[in-house]
Image: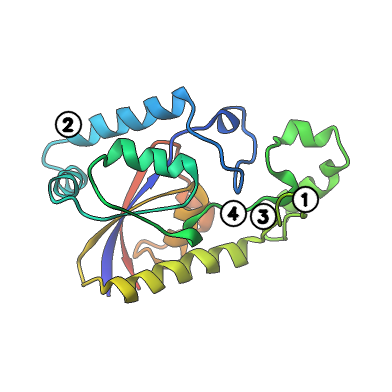
Amino acid sequence: MKIVLFLFRHGSTAGNVIKRYIGATDEKLCEIGRNEIENEKKSLISLKNTPESAAFMHILANKSKIYVSPLQRTQETAQILFPDNPKQIVPDFREMSFGAFEGKNAAEMEKTALGEHYRAWVESGCETKCPDSALFLGEDKAGFSNRICNALKNLADSEKWQNGEIIPIVCHGGTINALLERFAVTRKGYFEWRTAHGAYRFEEVEL
């Protein structure tokens, strides 16, 4: 089955702005992030005669269901983009948990004992498991991607999506990477699907 995923990345949080790892950490949008989403919405509305704009306006007009990660930053983003649409929370669409790296940026970690663990993780291509902390269990990229992709397939079955449907999802950068690496008709690696805060991907996928 082929469908189109309309994937919206949430706007920036205060931690995102200073390049901290904000995965499982449940931050709200900051003012910059809210502006990013408002501008994205204006842009989509103004882009006449494009598939993305037509799909966006159709979703708004028909009050189509929006699938959303459970974290505050995605729920706020969904509310700005689609204020009158029903929202379905999908717990497994949440971002990767960075464990002990949560809430810290690279420069901060280099000054602590975490620096060595962080460098090893980056050098592995982020394939190894993030170390756990007292608050957050770390994930590895393979397990994270499987969680995300299984959630999409389970949704497709339970919602009985049909060939050619456009599915709007408000989620995270890692979620977008995982879904499109696995399912996009256009084949690219995980990090090649990197999407800016307050941006979107409109991609045909095959399940």
Q: Circle 2 sits in a helix, a strand or a loop, which is it?
A: helix
Give the crowd class for mark 1: few <14, some 14-19, many >=20 residues within 10 Å. few
> What residue sits 83% from the left and 43% below the top?
114
Left or right of 189 in this view: 5: left
Q: Are marks 2 and 4 in contact (CB under 8 Å)?
A: no
Q: Circle 1 sits in a helix, a strand or a loop, which is it?
A: loop
From mark 4 to mark 3, how far is it between C-alphas? Answer: 14 Å
Task: Name the residue beneath numbered marker 3.
Answer: 125
Vertical order, 201 against 44 (above or below)? below
Task: Name the residue beneath numbered marker 2.
Answer: 46
Q: Amino acid at mark 1?
A: Ser
Q: Circle 3 sits in a helix, a strand or a loop, which is it?
A: loop
Give the crowd class for mark 4: few <14, some 14-19, many >=20 residues within 10 Å. many
From mark 1 to mark 3, how far is it between C-alphas? Answer: 21 Å
> What residue sits 44% from the left and 61% below the top?
179
Q: Amino acid at mark 4?
A: Met
Task: Name the residue beneath numbered marker 1.
Answer: 133
Q: Which is more foreground, mark 4 or mark 3? A: 4
Quadrant in the picture for the C terminus: bottom left
Quadrant in the picture for the N terminus: bottom left
Vertical order, 198 against 59 (above or below)? above
Give the crowd class for mark 2: few <14, some 14-19, many >=20 residues within 10 Å. few
The picture places residue 63, in percent across and down from the top left corner, at 18, 50
From mark 2 to mark 4, how far is it between C-alphas? Answer: 33 Å
Task: Name the residue beneath numbered marker 4.
Answer: 96
Q: Circle 4 sits in a helix, a strand or a loop, which is it?
A: loop
